[in-house]
């Protein structure tokens, strides 16, 4: 358990879910609030919005996570924060998530309730796994990967940086998901996905190219 208080960057819905997850295993005094450039005051839950993103240096002794689900926006915010200094990047992991000793987790990671991970899994930096995600053996998630609720990823899948996997998507074992690709919600992926492409459907097919990672 962290000895530093937490500040969450981003007070939108995902950031608030991260706060709720954090508070399941911490006291209220351990959560200072949110930094957000587009909001002020407090969240609907009554949690304080304590400043703008660039204000983070006022709380250098705290830990930080970026509670933003979109991988490209999350990376942009991380880079803007790190341009001002070296924050203490923390992790928020739901207390019901069991992590085997063979699982390696980077910094800035958010893992919400009901996530199931098995063995020999590598989770990169600034990864977000939402509720009830299933992640099989020997998977590797690159930095900034986002996985939406109820997605199921079979063993030996490699997701490169910035991969965005939608709700209820299913990924066949042994596949490679290229940098910055997006898997649409409910899609069944049965072959490798090229970088910077959106795939949808069952079986998933390329719909269009998206912004380069």
Image: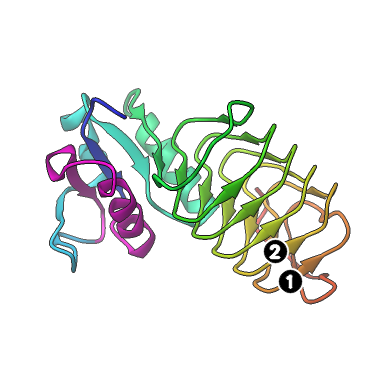
Q: Position of residue 189 (x, y in %)?
A: 81, 63
Mark 1 and mark 2 residues within 8 Å of each other at the beta carbon? yes
Q: Write down the residue under mark 1.
A: 187
What kind of element bears circle 2?
Answer: strand
Disc 1 packing (10 Å; few <14; some 14–19; many ≥20): many
Apparent side of residue 149 relative to residue 181 in the rendered image (left or right): left
Q: Can residue 12 be found in the magenta stretch?
A: yes
Apparent side of residue 200 relative to residue 24 in the rendered image (left or right): right
Q: Which residues are magenta?
A: 11-38
Residue 85 in view (yes/no): yes
Answer with the quarter of the image where residue 188 lies.
bottom right
Disc 2 packing (10 Å; few <14; some 14–19; many ≥20): many
Q: Nearer the viewer, residue 193 or 115?
A: 115
Q: Position of residue 196 (x, y in %)?
A: 72, 55
Residue lying at 34% horizontally and 51% vertically, measured from the top left: 21
Q: Nearer the viewer, residue 173 or 185?
A: 173
Answer with the quarter of the image where residue 169 lies.
bottom right
Q: Position of residue 93 (x, y in %)?
A: 42, 42
**Which quadrant of the figure contains the N terminus?**
top left
Q: Write down the residue under mark 2.
A: 183
> Marks 1/2: CA distance?
7 Å
Residue lying at 73% horizontally and 41% vertically, measured from the top left: 137
Apparent side of residue 15 relative to residue 169 in the rendered image (left or right): left
């Amino acid at each position: 358990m962290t000895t530093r208080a937490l500040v969450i960057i981003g007070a939108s819905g995902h950031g608030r879910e991260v706060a709720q997850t954090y508070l399941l295993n911490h006291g209220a005094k351990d959560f200072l609030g949110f930094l957000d450039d587009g909001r002020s005051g407090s969240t609907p839950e009554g949690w304080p919005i304590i400043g703008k993103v660039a204000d983070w240096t006022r709380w250098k002794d705290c830990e930080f996570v970026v509670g933003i689900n979109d991988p490209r926006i999350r990376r942009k915010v991380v880079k803007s924060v790190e341009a001002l200094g070296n924050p203490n990047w923390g992790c928020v992991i739901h207390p019901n998530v069991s992590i085997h000793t063979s699982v390696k987790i980077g910094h800035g990671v958010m893992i919400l309730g009901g996530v199931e991970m098995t063995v020999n899994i590598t989770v990169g930096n600034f990864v977000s796994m939402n509720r009830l995600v299933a992640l099989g053996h020997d998977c590797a998630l690159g930095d900034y990967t986002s996985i939406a609720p109820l997605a199921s990823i079979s063993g030996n899948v490699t997701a490169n940086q910035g991969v965005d996997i939608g709700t209820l998507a299913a990924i066949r074992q042994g596949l490679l998901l290229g940098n910055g690709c997006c898997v649409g919600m409910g899609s069944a992926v049965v072959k490798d996905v090229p970088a910077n492409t959106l795939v949808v459907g069952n079986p998933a097919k390329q719909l269009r190219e998206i912004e380069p990672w």
